[in-house]
Image: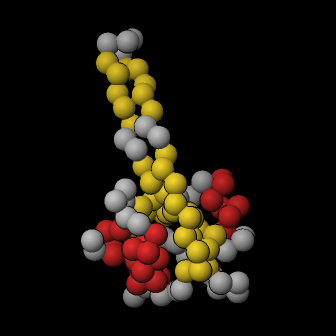
Amino acid sequence: MDYLSTIIKPLTTEKSTAHNAQNKYMFEVQRKADKTTIKKAFQEIYGVKAETVRTFLLPSKSRMLRRGQLWKKRPVAKRAIITIAKGKTIDPNKIKA
């Protein structure tokens, strides 16, 4: 698995911006990625050592479209909360050059 494709995108939600003050950053990752792969990918992309990686799966949800004629399912997504050392900061939207 390629490191650049392991981390899909950083998440900028109200909850994730509150985590940034505690040196925790939230990312959407590939579903097949494990914690060690995510940790190596983070270090490769951002150049900062990750202390801990916590992952969780968001369940799929169904919603109705066109007055009950069509049901659509959102796919299962995987997210990771990555903690870095105190005193270190990153800009999640910019990768290491």
Let me know if residue 79 appears in the view: yes
Quarter of the figure that contains the N terminus: bottom left
Instruction: Tell whether 30 sits left or right of 54.
Output: left
Q: Is residue 7 above or below residue 44?
A: above
Question: Compared to 7, does 79 lie above or below?
Answer: above
Q: Residue at left 48%, top 50%?
A: 57
Residue 8 visible in image: no
Q: Residue at x 65, y 84 (%)?
A: 85
Could you tell me which quadrant the C terminus lies in?
A: bottom left
Which residue occupies the foreground of this view, 38 or 94?
38
Relative to 16, is 40 on the left or the right? left
Along the line of sight, which residue is nearer the eye, 14 or 3?
3
Q: In this figure, what is the number of numbered marks?
A: 0
In percent of the image, x 70 and y 86: which residue is there? 87
Q: Residue at x 41, y 66 (%)?
A: 34
Query: x and y percent of residue 82 in the render?
Result: 56, 70
Tell me where residue 23 appears, x and y as whole percent.
67, 74
The image shows residue 36 at horizontal and vertical percentages of: 44, 75
Q: Quadrant of residue 19?
A: bottom right
- Which color scheme is applied? secondary structure
Horizontal and vertical percent for residue 71? 35, 22
Residue 68 placement: quadrant? top left
Q: Nearer the viewer, residue 96 or 39?
A: 39
Determine which quarter of the picture holds residue 62. top left
Query: Is 53 left, or right, of 68 in this rendering?
Result: right
